[in-house]
Image: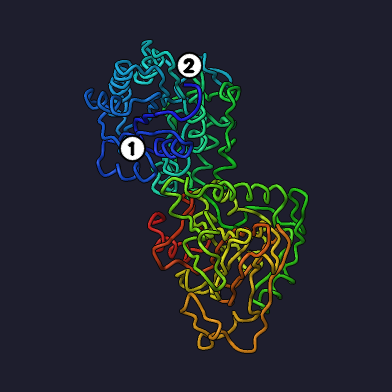
């Protein structure tokens, strides 16, 4: 097939790559079947909108049944067996499992297969290896990676066999992840053992992108690696550093050779994470600590934020909120708008695991009051939770330097950390009001040293439902207001306090103390009002509920030994 919706069988649909590929294909509108050996994993496949098939790739009858059931146009081979470091079992799967899969494909009339291989099997030599360089040989002339050669030969025997030689995978769920990653744990103890000294890395997001793009690629072999070939003498100490260890030993099992991604780029692919160096610094050390340069102004796009720490601090302490105009540069503002629009354009078309984080206005609408009727609001989106699950741009927003600059001033510390991101979306003439409330009762942290940072993607005006605050209400003692109530009636608001509508241009950041009383009206204008809202926690403030967010496996860190101990007690993955 050359276009439209395909029937795709993903063999190995619950692994680090397989699960991501399944999700992407479902979101693209393909009819996806995904296999697993484990019955308990079928639910995760079904949750993202694919059909789960139980299959042991070493049992030919299982493989035949999976192909006959799915009747695929294309098979994607992501079978691995490395969860327990069973390299022998993984080699057997490459040989026997691939042979079974290719045989079943032939029997079912399928000649199109994409398969996972590795980019570190090339023979040593000068420069980057392209796909024409032979694979390594042992001293006796036999293949050094015999199971890899067997897999590739079997797949390429098909009319449209495509072999993707992935670099060393890093990112969420990999061996390099701080959340249970085996190599990360070793690095924390100061030990690095590389498969090959010369290494090409690739982020799991980029490997996923390449696999989906390869649906239309011609037969052959393609390296999928980033732009930053490296040696273990460079990346080994870097891994130990981000893991918080001290180097004790660095070694490699073979010399190896880094790979070139020129062919993949010629086919239209390019990595979103072009360098492991930059990605690791963002991926592991995500608090504010000494990770960016400070100056009198930050300039990005066509806007600049004036660095005014005294002004920021005074306004925040007095009023309980602060407006910083021009916080978002033009490029960032446009990127965030596009990402939100991709979610709101067709919320009911999202896969179930994402749709569950989207709340629609029709779910709140009722006749009368300040809420439009359900028929008129249609599919208007009201609230989007867990934004980094939808698009990497929101995960990268965690490290947006102009905002970090303001946060450091308000927290008077570099050891603050991120809690979560959501979006409040007010569609024109189709949104309801937000009742008076304080944010703190929603957050379940050990102290009230938290801050809400609202990034305005559109002008915020009285007509489009701008936030209204009671300046100074963050200083009220609990007895003066129903602090425990998440929704506060007008009659329960403190008497005699000013009500102030917070208006500001698009690109502004509005920062609130989590105890300030605030609400917002309906959008009665003809244009949308979209705000990305993040919660940040200051020093010595830890989650005490079940929601202990770690987007992309990112956890708080500290240079203080006492805080390090508290973080290890709070987050199991840091223990």
Indicate the quadrant where residue 80 lies. top left
The 10 Å Cα crowd at callout 2, few under 14, some 14 to 19, many 20 or more, is some
Q: Nearer the viewer, residue 237 or 437?
A: 437
Helix, strand or loop at label 1? It is: strand
Q: Position of residue 398 (x, y in %)?
A: 58, 54
Indicate the quadrant where residue 67 lies. top left
Q: Which residue is mark 2?
A: 219
The correct choice, above or below, for 9 with respect to 186 in the image is above
Q: Position of residue 418 (x, y in %)?
A: 53, 60
The correct choice, above or below, for 467 with respect to 89 in the image is below
The correct choice, above or below, for 390 with respect to 540 in the image is above
Q: Is residue 566 left or right of residue 258?
A: left
Label 2 or label 1, whichever comes before in sequence order: 1
Q: Is residue 408 left or right of residue 347?
A: right
Helix, strand or loop at label 2? It is: loop
Q: Is residue 453 left or right of residue 145?
A: right
**Label disc, if present, on residue 287 of the rendered structure:** none
Regarding residue 518, the answer to whether it shows in the image is: yes
Regarding residue 422, the answer to whether it shows in the image is: no
Look at 53% across and 24% down and name the residue there: 259
Q: Position of residue 124 (x, y in %)?
A: 50, 19
Cα–Cα gap, marks 2 and 1: 27 Å
Q: Which residue is mark 1?
A: 51
**Contact (CB < 8 A) between labels 2 and 1?**
no
Q: Nearer the viewer, residue 267 or 528?
A: 528
- Image quadrant holding the C terminus, namely bottom left
Look at 70% across and 47% down and name the residue there: 331
Q: Nearer the viewer, residue 2 or 97?
A: 2
Q: Nearer the viewer, residue 2 or 517?
A: 2
């Amino acid at each position: 097939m050359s276009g439209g919706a395909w029937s795709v069988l993903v063999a190995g649909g619950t692994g680090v790559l397989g699960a991501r590929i399944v999700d992407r294909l479902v979101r693209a509108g393909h009819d996806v079947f995904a296999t697993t050996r484990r019955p308990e994993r079928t639910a995760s496949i079904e949750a993202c909108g694919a059909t789960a098939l139980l299959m042991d790739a070493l049992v030919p009858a299982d493989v035949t049944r999976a192909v006959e059931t799915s009747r695929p146009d294309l098979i994607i081979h992501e079978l691995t067996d490395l969860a327990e470091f069973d390299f022998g079992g993984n080699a057997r799967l490459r040989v026997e499992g691939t042979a079974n899969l290719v045989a079943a494909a032939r029997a079912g009339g399928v000649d199109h297969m994409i398969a996972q291989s590795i980019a570190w099997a090339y023979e040593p030599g000068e420069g980057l290896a392209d796909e024409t360089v032979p694979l390594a040989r042992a001293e006796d002339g036999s293949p050094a990676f015999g199971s890899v050669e067997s897999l590739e030969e079997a797949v390429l025997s098909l009319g449209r066999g495509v072999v993707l030689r992935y670099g060393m995978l890093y990112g969420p769920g990999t061996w390099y992840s701080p959340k249970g990653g085996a190599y990360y744990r070793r690095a924390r103890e100061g030990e690095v053992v590389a498969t090959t000294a010369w290494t090409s890395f690739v982020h799991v997001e980029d490997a996923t992108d390449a696999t989906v793009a390869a649906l239309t690629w011609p037969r052959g072999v393609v390296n999928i690696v980033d732009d930053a070939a490296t040696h273990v003498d460079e990346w080994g100490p870097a891994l130990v550093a981000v893991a918080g260890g001290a180097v004790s030993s660095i070694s490699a099992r073979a010399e190896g050779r880094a790979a070139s991604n020129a062919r993949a780029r010629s086919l239209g692919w390019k990595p979103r994470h072009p360098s492991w160096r930059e990605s690791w610094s963002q991926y592991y050390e995500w608090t504010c600590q000494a990770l960016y340069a400070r100056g009198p102004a930050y300039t990005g796009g066509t806007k600049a934020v004036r660095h005014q720490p005294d002004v920021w601090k005074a306004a925040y302490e007095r009023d309980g909120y602060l407006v910083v105009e021009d916080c978002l540069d033009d490029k960032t503002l446009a990127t965030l708008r596009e990402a939100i629009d991709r979610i709101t354009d067709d919320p009911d078309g999202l896969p179930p695991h994402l749709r569950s984080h989207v709340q629609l206005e029709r779910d709140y609408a009722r006749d009368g009051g300040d809420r439009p009727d359900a028929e008129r609001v249609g599919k208007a989106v009201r609230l989007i939770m867990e934004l980094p699950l939808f698009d990497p741009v929101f995960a990268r927003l965690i490290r947006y330097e102009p905002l970090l600059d303001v946060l450091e001033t308000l927290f008077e510390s570099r050891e603050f950390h991120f809690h979560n991101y959501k979006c409040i979306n007010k569609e024109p003439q189709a949104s309801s009001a937000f009742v008076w409330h304080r944010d703190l009762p929603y957050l379940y942290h050990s102290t009230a040293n938290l801050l809400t940072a609202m990034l305005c993607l559109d002008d915020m005006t009285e007509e489009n439902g701008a936030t209204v605050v009671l300046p100074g209400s963050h200083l009220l003692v609990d007895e003066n207001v129903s602090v425990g109530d998440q929704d506060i009636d007008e009659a329960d608001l403190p008497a005699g306090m000013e009500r102030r509508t917070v208006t500001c241009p698009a690109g502004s950041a509005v920062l609130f103390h989590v105890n300030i009383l605030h609400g917002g009206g309906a959008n009665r204008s003809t244009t949308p009002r979209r705000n990305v809202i993040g919660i940040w926690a200051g020093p010595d403030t830890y989650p005490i509920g079940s929601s202990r967010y770690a987007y992309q496996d990112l956890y708080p860190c500290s240079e203080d030994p006492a805080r390090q101990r508290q973080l290890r007690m709070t987050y199991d993955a840091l223990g």
